[in-house]
Amino acid sequence: MYPLLACSILSLTVIIYRLLWGPKAQQAAPNALRTRIISLLLDGQEQQALIVAEQSPSMAGRIFAELLAHSHESREELWQRAEIRGRALNVELDRFLAILSTVATVAPLLGLLGTVFGMIETFSVLHMEGIGNATALSGGISAALLTTAFGLVVAIPSTIFYRYFLARTEEISDTLEIWSAEVCHALSVRSSSDQKRSNDSAATIR
């Protein structure tokens, strides 16, 4: 029972932490920031877009700042930077989820193990005292099954919240990936336009 109690405390701690201080979509990827960055890039205000991204404390702001700071690179290089930064942010998004997943997996096994030990003890009593002591027999079986029930009580909420937090994390991760692609595209279009104007100017001079 003590390992299951430790698992329940650990699971509850992670759940409370993620609910109160875990990443939230509007904080990690505010749509207003994405709209502002794209608008500035389309207007040719790349430096201002970089300043706006650097001032944002959000995850999206960190990715945008990384891309805008290296806007001179090719689209493939920019995408590689976005992927590297995204993997780093995924570690932050998944914080403590591994603990919750482990508890959800281990708790039923610990409960089952407790039941096995309880049944072994019950059969030992049965061997020593015979089937006449119904009170000891029923008490032993009840105690054995209680650990399985407690293991399930710990595992079921842990699994539910793990799936819930994982879905939120994947939603944020997918949003950041899409927005990174949009910024990379906007930067490549801007770079192509600048190159075209430069070529036109050179042709006019010649």
Image (cartoon, grey):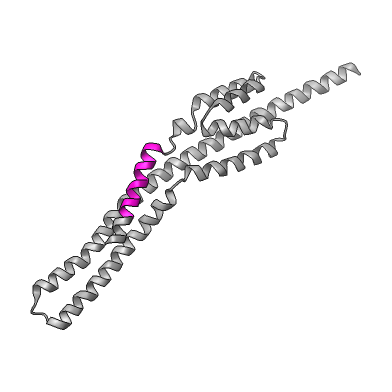
Q: Nearer the viewer, residue 143 or 203?
A: 143
Which quadrant of the rendered structure holds the C terminus? top right
Q: Position of residue 199 (x, y in %)?
A: 82, 23
Q: Main secondary structure of the magenta part?
A: helix
Which quadrant of the rendered structure holds the N terminus? bottom left
Residue name at image x 33 percent, y 64 percent: 109
Q: Is residue 58 above or below residue 203?
A: below
In reply to whether residue 137 is colored magenta, the answer given is: no
Quarter location, residue 114: bottom left
Q: Residue furthest top?
A: 204
Is residue 155 visible from the viewing direction of this image?
Answer: no
In reply to whether residue 11 is colored magenta, the answer given is: yes
Q: Position of residue 104 (x, y in %)?
A: 36, 55
Which segment is the magenta one?
7-21
Instruction: Count the labels in the image.
Output: 0
Q: Nearer the viewer, residue 93 or 39?
A: 93
Q: Position of residue 71 (x, y in %)?
A: 69, 30
Is residue 94 visible from the viewing direction of this image?
Answer: yes
Q: Is residue 46 left or right of residue 32?
A: right
Q: Position of residue 102 (x, y in %)?
A: 40, 56
